[in-house]
Amino acid sequence: MQALMMNSQLMISSILRHADKNFPDSEIVSVTADNPRHRHTYKDFANRSRQLANALAELGAKFGDRIGTLAWNDYRHLELYYGVSGSGMVCHTINPKLFPEQVNYIINHAEDRFIFVDLLVVPLLEALQDHLPKVEGYIILTDEAHMPKTTLPNVFCYETLLSKQSTSFDWPEFDENTASAMCYTSGTTGNPKGVVYSHRSTLLHALGGSMPDVVAASYKETTLPIVPMFHVNAWGAPYAALMAGSKMVMPGPKMADGESLQNLIETEKVTFSSGVPTIWLALLDYLDKTGKTIPTLTRASVGGAACPRIIIERFKHQHDVEVIQGWGMTETSPLGTIYCKKSGMEDLSEEEEIDLQCLQGRGVFGIEMRIVDDSNRELPWDGVAFGALKVRGPWVCSGYYGLSQVPGSEGCPVDELGWFDTGDVATINPQGYLQITDRTKDVIKTGGEWVSSIEIENAAVNHPDVAEAAAIGRYHPKWTERPLLVVVRQAGASLTTDELLKYLSNTLHKISMPDDVVFVDELPHTATGKLNKLALRKSLADYQFPIIA
Amino acid sequence: MQALMMNSQLMISSILRHADKNFPDSEIVSVTADNPRHRHTYKDFANRSRQLANALAELGAKFGDRIGTLAWNDYRHLELYYGVSGSGMVCHTINPKLFPEQVNYIINHAEDRFIFVDLLVVPLLEALQDHLPKVEGYIILTDEAHMPKTTLPNVFCYETLLSKQSTSFDWPEFDENTASAMCYTSGTTGNPKGVVYSHRSTLLHALGGSMPDVVAASYKETTLPIVPMFHVNAWGAPYAALMAGSKMVMPGPKMADGESLQNLIETEKVTFSSGVPTIWLALLDYLDKTGKTIPTLTRASVGGAACPRIIIERFKHQHDVEVIQGWGMTETSPLGTIYCKKSGMEDLSEEEEIDLQCLQGRGVFGIEMRIVDDSNRELPWDGVAFGALKVRGPWVCSGYYGLSQVPGSEGCPVDELGWFDTGDVATINPQGYLQITDRTKDVIKTGGEWVSSIEIENAAVNHPDVAEAAAIGRYHPKWTERPLLVVVRQAGASLTTDELLKYLSNTLHKISMPDDVVFVDELPHTATGKLNKLALRKSLADYQFPIIA
Ligand SMILES: Nc1ncnc2c1ncn2[C@@H]1O[C@H](COP(=O)(O)O)[C@@H](O)[C@H]1O
């Protein structure tokens, strides 16, 4: 039997309409290349987003067109989020820090018709322009006074374009499963792959992510998304903040700069902020060095990589900030799990609480998760069994742009049972807290058992003489694979293999103990700064363990 | 362009699965006719809901069948919410306090195949059974030991039925627009009308309603829904609580009893509770009388009727409880607007804050609202203009069961533009706060202007000698209609018309001043306790104003 409820579609434009009507005076503060501290209100913002929608129509952009952005976190990028998606076009955010050939591949693969580009990123596009035959125009995100001299063809000035437009625009309503945004994810192998979000997935993610025990978006918060808007939509902050009426502070290009961040937090009274671990380290170090403080900040959400315990401890002890670690990925919009206590945990000691914050969090409504063994059989939530992490839910991707959508087939990340394979390996403890132990392709399979490469690396970097460490599996005639540890020493240190192995034997199980250590001057990394184990395995392809038992 | 996200349907069963996996130890405490304090956990609850699903299948109930409930707020009723809707059947909650002929009409109109009935309500059904030819069986919500002797045919004992079933059941996934629940709303005219909720509307309502600035559902809360589960699904608490993992306390038949409520709040450490104004008055009076306290309660949500200022003040000053007034109706699931401050309101005085709490709240994401004049033209949000309140959104009904679904046509409450006509008349102030000033059909139209009957009534009941008051429009040759005030005096009081009019002239505008006052011994009410103005108008049909100008 069909229900008799309105068939209102979940539209990104409805967030804007809600924000405009209910919170016209809420503020958006931005750092941009052309203005160190731009301020306007939701009302201004809504007017400008409608002007943008009119401008897009005038440019000739059509429903379904991909519109590329190469931009930082600021109000103009936010206007693109609403103006482009609200018009039924696809806001395709591109990471300006990728290798140029990746940017090139991504723009062509998505067939972007127009590209909105930050002043600072114009040179990148100038270098690529000959390879971008399908791009019909470039819009530079600045005003007339700051327009650069450029070799780009069909160039427009963003502010000039907007200023000619009416602030009236009727946002169209259409199927909520229509593509709203696109974000490419680049692994260590193959070409970047495009994840395509819908209006529906975006709204459900914003609702689920705003809940009190998740991110707790509220009018009371002033939120500073440091995680870039080209990185999984700044974890959804641009949507959740406008839903709740929060004041937004956008750091522009100053994302990894402790001084700018401290200054923004202090002067704009930021209460909540989100970013990857390295950002937080930069900020904490800056605060240490200068003795400056961040008294208004109460919560910092951390994701994108495991959060080192030391970040949690420093935030708590030095700045009274609660770290909220979450796990997610481009393919999950990104919210997967997030730290939050549960009832019965009122009396945790400070140490126990930090232990809990070091895990990747617990399930949120909307995402179902399971860990499975090699035969796709579900493993128990006992904190010990570890297996491939699979998830499903309305904000999880069903496939990549241009690749197979058939569950279980080549190129499709969803298995026959409808679960998305995250590529992560994890345990889940009896309380439901997730711990990522490895990437599926990095796990070391030895004598039928799985050994976590990350566990070995964490143990190794605890040694004061170790600057960086990577553990990979190498061929072993008896055990198929055994762990090999590759280490960069701290400058000036003279650590030996025996010393390090002795040290590791204090914390690692026998099965996880590396069979050998190789010292190197540096380890290979990907464009986004992650350890490139594929390259490492290649460079050590000829390696053989010294003593074959 | 279609997005590439999972097409996971929003299913009520997914809340149960989430609750079971993530919060197995969260508690549900219930008062029932057969147990003064029943306790179990989400895990037990999930098992029993699956047993219920198996039992329904064994009874022969099918996808789409309407399953009636006549029950109070307790764990068994909650199991019906999940077991019935989760199976793809329609959980049709019926108010046992309606007039028997209304219950009769409702059961037959919905064509309920089975009815689950509380011990205390069995006599009602016994009296009606001959008029219920389509009901195939009655399941009494108790255990074997408490089974009553009954004349009902095809009777089952709920606990016996469940005990035979497996705790395994695979919840089916189906179209999220499928009917999940049904609730009849009885106005003062005509037959009750059935609102049919969907899985989608229910989940979106639960998400939207759980937000930090709405009801803020959290694992930290212990929630006591006093508003009945047959009254718009207890305002959604059964869904929001399980999503968040809150401890639930269910008062069973003891809904309007101050002593029981105080005892539950104190012993179970309730932090949040929801109910209509009369419930709160009963509790506050009991606390006054006994000197008992409710120290754990921090927030009380109030809706269903305007919340008298005195409730807000007493809660705040005597018990440090924040009153959260909301407006909504059966047709809006019910969340429409709710009290919450906005940024910029940090420095409100206590009086100003109470003024704000006396309004019906501000917009929530998911509901769009507008007020319109007689020609359906939108009126400004200036706090002065008042007009018919219309709303739209994914948890607003599109029509009534068995009546027209065509917008704008007879019987359909949705206008040609897609807006649901609430039947309420309201102002919206520049900050976006709603104030209900009347029901459309009660508003008094005098000389082309609208006068709020509620404004007159509120002014009148402020007089210490007035127990209850109703204002209605009566024919006037010059002004078409003028207000007539009908008053019940406090016992022993001897208030006169002149005294009361003089008193009113201090607060009411000239246009709102009643032309006359009629004193009566009592005023007519509907089954749900609302003032029955239709009956009042009928009984005063022959009334004429004494001095016709
Ligand atoms: N906070 C409130 N203040 C004034 N009237 C209210 C409030 N909440 C609900 N109502 C009235 O109750 C009606 C809904 O009744 P029901 O469908 O029985 O819940 C609304 O249309 C309003 O007339």
Image (cartoon, coloured by chain):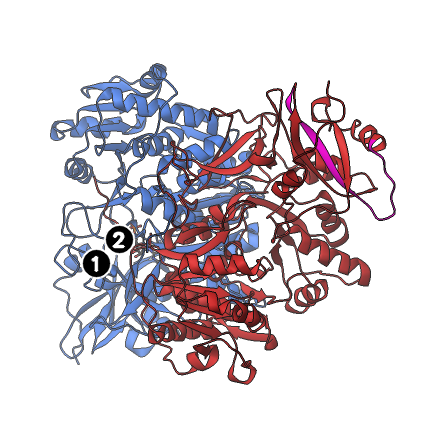
Chain colours: A red, B blue
Mark 2: amino acid = Met
The residue tagged 1 is B414
Mark 1 crowd level (few <14, some 14–19, many ≥20, 10 Å Cα): many
Q: Position of residue B309 (x, y in %)?
A: 45, 59
Chain part drawn in magenta: A479-497
Mark 2 crowd level (few <14, some 14–19, many ≥20, 10 Å Cα): many
Give the tally of numbered discs.
2
Q: Judge from the rendering whether residue A240 lies leftward or rightward of residue B495; answer left or right.
A: right
The residue tagged 2 is A6
Determine the residue located farthest toward the front in the rendered image: A542
> Callout 2: residue from which chain?
A
Residue closer to the observer: A41 or B108: A41
Q: Quadrant of residue A515?
A: top right
Residue closer to the observer: A151 or A65: A151
| Quarter of the rendered structure image containing ligand 1 | bottom left
> Mark 1 vs ligand 1: CB under 8 Å?
no
Q: Judge from the rendering whether residue A125 lies leftward or rightward of residue B429; answer left or right.
A: right
Q: Position of residue B301 (x, y in %)?
A: 45, 50
Q: Is residue B344 visible?
A: no
